[in-house]
Amino acid sequence: MSSVLWQGGWATRLRIGSGLVLFAFAFFHFINIGLGLFHTDYLHGMQDGRHAVTRHDIGSAFLYLALFVHTGLALYSISQRRTLRMPVSTALQVVLGLLIPLQLITHIVYTRYAHEVYDVNDEMGYIIILMWNSSAIWLQSALLLIVWIHSCIGLHMWLRLTDWWSKTAPYLIGLAVFVPSFALAGLLTEGRRLWMDFADPFLRDQYIDHYNWPSQQDFQALFSIKSNAVTAFWIALGASLTVFAVRKLLRRRHSVRVKYVEGPEVVAEKGMTLLEISQANGIPHTALCGGKGRCTTCRVIVEDGADALPSPSVVEARSLAAVGAPRKARLACQIRPTEPLTAFRMFRPDGGRQRAHSSQGQERKLAVLFLDMRGFTSRTTGQLPYDIVFLLNRFFDAIVPAITAEHGVVDKYMGDGLLAVFETPDIESSARAGLQAAINVSRALVQFNQRLEAEGSPRIRIGMGLHLGDLVLGEIGAAGTATRTIIGDAVNVASRLEGQTKDLGVELLVSSELLQAAGFGGDQSGLKSFDLRGVTRPIPALPVTSATDLAATAAE
């Protein structure tokens, strides 16, 4: 887990670490403000506790170091960017991050600086009264929201790759909404009370004396310090943008021209992959696997300039061979043009179908269930077509609800069998849904067989293969008739596992990978390794005589 959370270079780790320090400060600061909703003593009591940490020499050094490091790294990252094109969430985080210093400088100067230089008692009451009857209250309220939204986006971008984040996100969203709402409610409540007191001349004099209110001359000095600090920030931001512009101009001297067939012609920096060039210039380019060289949906036909490209790597060559790619086909995520290039994108993200089919889908790791009726041919020999269709429909009516009840979708019916996929939000829930669906199908089959026996008909036996693996979900078919379906090795594995159930005389074969993802706590001592046709590696799987046995085993 730690390797996932702290991966990246030194700048990334410093940015995350300093950001966490600032987030902790902001969180407790906002909770502190919110206590004004209850009583002034609670508000000041927590502030005294926070100051014992943040106003200590070590605490102050740690906090302000984190602030300068985080801000400095943000400006540094801007200067080092190759392009200002970025996802909306990233752009929002950057813009909000740049807005924070403009208001935070004012807050720091009129509180901490005023306290240290002019011995101002910068309690919450002083801060609120200072802002209340001016636009500053709106600006600081906006700062509160900006800081919080910026922090939440940063946390999400950092933790989204962890296994637990998606599970806890719904609860954390509630906390993310509560904290700023609580703080603003406390600010409003305490502000109204304080301003009513401050309107009384007698109480106003007491407040001024208690807070050691700055004189007019002091305020002018504070305003000058604030203006200089804001100017320094604008200079630093301007320097970052200047470095960015200079680096971009220098890179253009070492640029390459790329022409897209039925698309634009762009000039890009050498060293970028063709897929990165497409993304940097806003050119639609399909890449279901995200540019890892696995799905091949980013592949292009290099119509001019292919000879100047290095030979395909082992990974690229293997992927191209797997799809029978034609000559001059390359993966855009793997090639880095250094000479002028003309390329045709074989897959059109906009859904257009001109020289090739489009790929509209995504890569997911999901549970797949392959089910087949045993002895169907011998059972239906000599029956009328109507009777065969009637039996199949009754059979599917009995078992399919057990699949759909677990959010499964029947991808296709294949005579006396079916293929189902469990497209849930995450891997674990998909595995659990597939396992429970297999159990429910077995139970439904028992009830269906009881009805058949009551009618004097023989019982039906089934075989099921259940596996968890990588799939591509997308529209596959000729123009105008394409339907959404699934393809991938996981489908083949589930099908081959189902085929093995007949020889073993069991109802279900479920792969070890799915059992682990589902958190199955039952007996797995019967696991066997299967060499399946068309599958490059042995698949450990658990033979189960009746899928209902899984429910009983897990409950023990």
Image: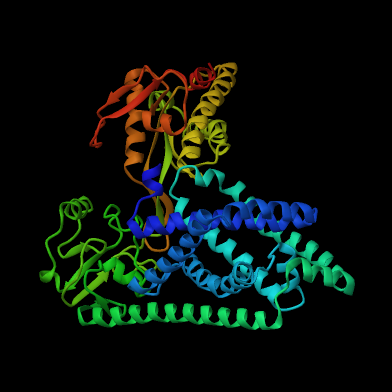
Q: Residue at x 75, y 73 (%)?
A: 132
The percent coordinates of residue 414 (x first, y second) are 41, 39
**Dividing the picture into quarters, in which one does residue 215 lie?**
bottom right
In the image shown, does 146 or 52 lie closer to the viewer?
52
Vertical comparison of 259 with 458: above or below: below
Q: Relative to 292, is 19 on the left or the right?
A: right
Vertical comparison of 509 with 242: above or below: above
In the image shown, does 171 or 53 lie closer to the viewer?
53
Q: Relative to 544, is 186 on the left or the right?
A: right
Q: Residue at x 24, y 78 (%)?
A: 251
Q: Relative to 497, is 147 on the left or the right?
A: right
In the image shown, does 531 or 55 lie closer to the viewer?
55
Q: Assign the N terminus to one quadrant of the image.
A: top left
User: Colour scheme in the image?
Assistant: rainbow
Q: Residue at x 33, y 81 (%)?
A: 245
The percent coordinates of residue 213 (x first, y second) are 73, 73
The percent coordinates of residue 85 (x first, y second) are 40, 73
Residue 263 visible to an observer of this rendering: yes
